Image: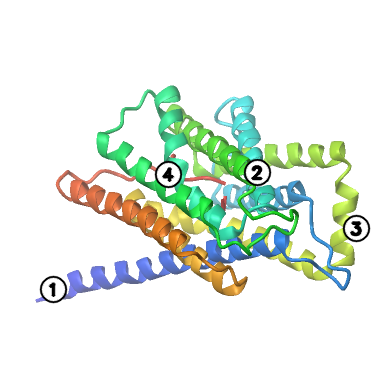
Amino acid sequence: MAEPESVNGVKENKLWKGVFAVSGIMSTLVIYGVLQEKIMRVPYGVNKEYFKYSLFLVFCNRLTTSAVSAGALLASKKVLDPVAPVYKYCLISVTNILTTTCQYEALKYVSFPVQTLAKCAKMIPVMVWGTLIMQKKYMGFDYLVAFLVTLGCSVFILFPVGDDVSPYNKGRENTVWGVSLMAGYLGFDGFTSTFQDKLFKGYNMEIHNQIFYTTLCSCVLSFTGLILQDHLLPAVDFVSLHRDCLLDIALLSTVATASQFFISYTIRTFGALTFAAIMTTRQLASIMLSCIWFSHPLSWEQCIGSVIVFGSLYAKNLLNNNKKSQKPLLPPELPQYEKAEAS
């Protein structure tokens, strides 16, 4: 008689864990997306000044994440020494900084819905880097999904509503520079996640160990970049003058760090496939919230492009889940999904 109660208890426990994971990821990353658009595209103060120092945002985010990951390592009494050669952490750090900088800079020229949907096309550079670095082989269905996602993203970017313009440019939002920045984002992001995968598989490495050294290198590199560009003092002056911008940046760094915990927790508890489905839903929710919050109109072509993208991704997740149910359960692999982004 106790066995059904035990099974029900396990199901209820997993249900609450699922609610915790989904609500954590959705809330932190959706807030993160709205905040980054607000900081980069909405003017501050009576003089309507725009925040232009994207590398300063990278520095603040990485500083917060580095401090939290160091605290987690010390609290758990796990290895704080570098497991891999430091230059490998630095390589991830460099490409991660370039990824995040391209992401923030692109928001000066394209709207957040365009950027968010374009991120769905990251499977193509991931497949390219995976083939080059990890010698991976992909199925024909993977290439089909990648093609459909790219097609949907292209439709979404090429057919915006005519009156949606960039605050940094008088033309329509699909500027060549904005699209180039998104291409740079996808390329660097694909390399970062693939090389992280390689490090995890090559070394017996804790997640927080990689995050700590990667973000620590990012702190040093982004701080050096701010000094060389002479942007550190202007950025500090800007946030000193506009305290609401300082609050936005502090909140952005906080939710970016918190999202890492929920990402790790979700993958450990439910596996990578469930996490991928949640992230797809999160991107859809981010686009809808951005359109409502910042009054981004969508053309009917963009709606079709969105359906193509998310339909393809959900179909891929469904097929992967069906394959998973027909195979013996294996421990979920963290490497290729665990990243220091909220994005």
SS for dot 3? helix
Where is mark 1, residue-wise?
Answer: 4
Where is mark 4, residue-wise?
Answer: 150
Which of 10/89 is in front? 89
Q: Position of residue 284 (x, y in %)?
A: 45, 63
Can residue 260 be seen from the camera position used here? no
Q: Residue at x 57, y 50 (%)?
A: 341
Which of 314/93 is in front? 314
Instruction: Give me the C-alpha separation between circle 4 and circle 1.
Output: 47 Å
Question: Mark 4 and 1 residues: CB-CB less than 8 Å, in contact?
Answer: no
Q: Sequence-wise, which precedes: disc 4 or disc 3? A: 4
Question: Mark 1 and 2 residues: CB-CB less than 8 Å, in contact?
Answer: no
Q: Residues within 10 Å of mark 4 (few under 14, many from 20)?
A: many
Q: Nearer the viewer, mark 4 or mark 3?
A: 4
Q: Residue at x 29, y 49 (%)?
A: 316
Q: Residue at x 65, y 64 (%)?
A: 35
Q: Position of residue 190 (x, y in %)?
A: 50, 37
Q: Sequence-wise, which precedes: disc 2 or disc 4? A: 2
SS for dot 1? helix
Q: Sequence-wise, which precedes: disc 1 or disc 2? A: 1
For residue 149, side relative to residue 64 (left or right): left
Where is mark 2, residue-wise?
Answer: 102
Where is mark 3, residue-wise?
Answer: 237
Instruction: Give me the C-alpha separation between circle 1 and circle 3.
Output: 63 Å
